[in-house]
Image (tube, helix red, strand yellow):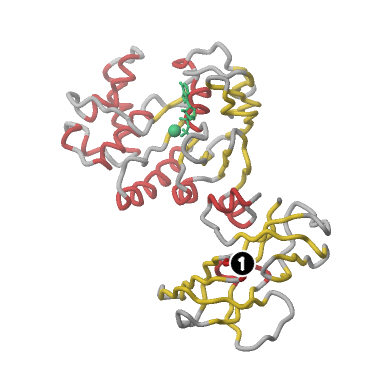
Amino acid sequence: MLTVENIYKDYENQPLLKGVSFEVKGGETVCLLGRSGSGKSTLLRIIAGIESSKSGRVLWNGKDLQGVPVHQRQFGFMFQDYALFPHLSVLENVSFGLKMQGMGKEERTARAHSALEQVNMGPFAQRWVTELSGGEQQRVALARSLAPQPRLLMLDEPLGALDRTLREQLMQELREVLHQTQIPTIYVTHDQEEAFTIGDRLILLNQGKIVQEGSPQQVYDFPKNSWVAAFLGLTNLVKGTVVEEKSPVVETALGSFVVKPPLDFALAPGSPVTLLIRPQAAEIRKTIDAEQNLITVFVKDCVYLGAAYRIQVEAQNQMQLDLLVSQPVEIGETILIYFKKEYLTCLEG
Ligand code: ADP
Ligand code: MG
């Protein structure tokens, strides 16, 4: 088990990581998510031992890795710009690192074959890497990091350089391979879809700190704050104040709303919150038949999605909301929308 404990890192006197702690348990794939420049790669390099931290510790099964050199940590690494050797075959690429470790030919060939099998590239062993598609090269790079049988795998935006269709396909493949291998993995990405597909657990990094940690469902259902919600693409965020704690009510510029009780914090009356309105909260109403959760909006756009209509509306204060409704509405119309409380979440601050 990997333990990362209170890591601090500065660059040119600018703090980048400000006390980062987390664990990766056996067999688990943890996705480390954060915007570009948030320090994800730096954190991986610190864990790998390539870079030092200002303070904090990295432990494996409780043993401090301070002073343990990179190659003795038995951690596998795969970067976005995984350079394969163009003058070597697929098999030679995968077994190259093992050769450097001094492993005999028979054993390293067997290991390389088995790693290629793991990523469904067995039949490609004798090909030149220059003959492979981008996706196939990616899998060879993954096989190369699996071949030494690392006790921890770190993948740094492995799909970052690929186009969308290929990325989606490889995402599914990576998910399967990582679950099969059962090697604990840290998977770094800035793409939430990738994280949701691949991660058993998500860790969200922002401004040098872990903002939230949990299963994809926990994070999606209960984003910790408006940064997390916005990062997940949940954009209907409205500032408000709690007016009632039991069967909570929040007052906002759009009106007052009965909301879903939060999971792990109290809604003290008077405290500021951000109200997250999920698109599926919306129901079109013909008459004013409720005192709360009902607003008047101006329809700016309506798109048929098959199962529902996505509408873009403008509410009071020129606030834009993206909603899903079951029936079409006219662009330019003013309509009444009711919000179901089970889709109204309160976020801290
Ligand atoms: P991410 O992987 O999340 O995009 P990085 O860890 O690569 O973020 O980088 C975070 C920040 O640290 C960036 O702003 C980058 O400019 C800075 N940084 C990274 N490495 C160095 C370095 N060796 N020297 C100075 N600044 C660096
Ligand atoms: Mg990076």
Residue, disc 1: 317
> Which element is circle 1 on?
helix
**From what the image shows, is residue 230 above or below residue 21?**
below
Residue extending farthest to the bottom is 287
Quarter of image, ligand 2: top left
Q: Picture quarter containing residue 143?
A: top left
- List x then y, in percent, for residue 302: 44, 75
Residue at 52% in and 35% down: 38
Q: Residue at horizontal 64%, vertical 73%?
A: 339
- In percent of width and height, residue 58 lies at 59, 22
Q: Is residue 75 left or right of residue 221?
A: left
Circle 1: residue type? Asn
**Image location of residue 236, percent across then percent down:** 58, 62
Instruction: Tell me: is circle 1 under 8 Å from ligand 1.
Output: no
Residue at (49% x, 50% y) in the render: 196
Left or right side of 264 for 158: left
Q: Is residue 122 above or below residue 109?
A: below
Placement of 252 over or under 113, stated as above or below: below
Residue 95 lies in quadrant? top left
Q: Is residue 103 above or below residue 327?
A: above
Quadrant (top left, top right, bottom left, bottom right) of the N terminus: top right
Q: Is residue 324 left or right of residue 54?
A: left
Percent across and percent down for residue 79 are: 38, 31
Count of numbered circles in the view: 1
**What is the crowding at mark 1: few (fewer than 14 residues within 10 Å), some, or many (at least 20)?**
few
Compare residues 210 and 2 and report the one nearer the observer: 210
Q: Along the line of sight, which residue is nearer the eye, 146 or 103? A: 146
